[in-house]
Image (tube, rainbow, N blue to C red):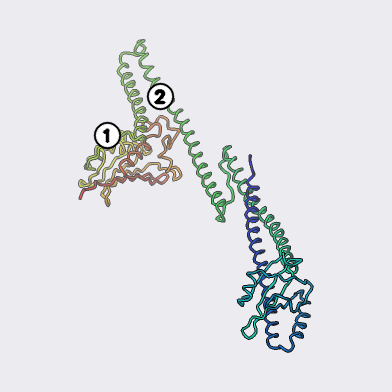
Amino acid sequence: MKVKYLYQQLGSHIGVLLIAFLILSLLFTQFVEKLVYENKIEELTSYGYNILLDLENNQARTQQVLQQYGNVLAGREIQYSLFDTSAAIIYSKGSLHPEVELTNNEWRDIKNGKTVIIKKEFRRFEQGVTFVLLPYVHNDQFMGGILLVSPIKGSRDVIDQINRYLFYTVIISLAVALLVSWIISAFHVKRIKRIREATALVAAGDYSVQIPSSNFDEIGDLARDFNKMVGKLHVSMEEIESLENRRRQFMVDVSHELRTPLTTISGVIEGIRNDMIPESEKEKGMLLASKESKRLIRLVNENLDYEKIRSNQVKLFKEETQLFEVLEIIKDQLEMQAQEKNNEIIVDVDDNVYIYADYDRLTQILINITKNSIQFTENGKITLRGKAGTDETIIEIEDTGIGIDPAEIEKIWGRFYKAMLSRTTNPYGEFGLGLSIVKQLVMMHQGNIEVTSEKGKGTKFIIRFPVKKTSV
């Protein structure tokens, strides 16, 4: 059975209050009853001692003293009786007219000079009473005793009146507590309902929803955490959407890039097979087919390489290598490509600078970045710079090309990102995988890479490799 949270809150609050009020009421009632009876006993005992004291001091006026106290106590509905050593009543004043029948224990206590106190007595009188028995001793000789009796009706009336007021107080308190509990519970239920509605919106795909949060309580903390979660989901969905868009573009690029060389190769093969290509042009056609085949292999290898790196299937074999030697090799490999765009490659590094890295992967990193610089530079310079830092080796590849928009810098590491999507015939890093591979390889070396660029003025890649740790 489903019970609403509001009713659960109300039930728990009212249940706790009822139990608390019940316990407090019982304790308070017992306290008041005890207090009323103790006050009555104290009053009776005080009158009894006063009577005995006056009798002791006024032996000649015994009857007068008894009469005076009788008149006073009658107005307070207190009866008292004086009895002798044989329990015979000597004097009695009041409306109860009890037949004094003391128990053996009571009579023994009186003879021993003890005061007997009975808070409630119903058997020996026509109504419930409180009574006190005091011994009457004259010249160290037991002379009898005095009995003071007061109906408990008056005491019960006081107790009943207090209980009645207590009952009214409990009812009013419960009503107020119920109202306050209803308001507080409704407030919390409203906040929970707001989170529930927001959750439904998120489940429906709306990641822009936000709900009010606070530091007031755990629900406020939950709302704040919910907003953080939705914010992260929103960012993740944007990334997924961006990745999906890039994937679509990637598929378009793949189709285009693969179709072009395949068409060329197929055309050359068909032309040679059907003797449609002159003998003098066959060698040129074969070279073209070979070039396009290598291009296809390079594109496939680039994708496979990225997946291996991403899944940690590549193992590094690090060694210390002279950085000047590495940069000179990169220059030699790419100098012809640079000259095609009228660019100059400059190497700036001291002979005593060494780098601790996997030689093949380091070469792959530098070739990718340098090719990227050649691609976007014309009639300019590409500088390969190396230097030793504190516990690191620093490589800088700086060009004077077209630069990168600052808003695009963080995106260049994306797997399918291409700075110029229109350049589908780019022979280097056709699918935008080159820089993704570069970053993965640098991270595998526990290094880091950063880019600074200014539109129209060029770009600088800064790569930092940690030096080899020497054992102590």
* 247 vs 171: above or below: above
Q: Label 1's element?
A: helix
Which quarter of the figure has residue 341? top left
* Residue 373 in view of the camera: no
* 127 vs 331: above or below: below
Which quarter of the figure has residue 418? top left
Q: Read off the residue under disc 2.
A: 258
* 23 vs 393: above or below: below
In this view, the residue in front, 375 or 184, is 184
Verify CB contact (< 8 Å) between mark 2 and mark 1.
Answer: no
Amino acid type at circle 2 is Leu
In this view, the residue in front, 472 or 107, is 107
Q: Read off the residue under disc 1.
A: 333
Which residue occupies the extreme top position in the image?
Answer: 274
Q: Residues within 10 Å of mark 2 (few under 14, many from 20)?
A: some
Q: Residue at x 36, y 19 (%)?
A: 265
* Residue 174 in view of the camera: yes
In this view, the residue in front, 197 or 137, is 137
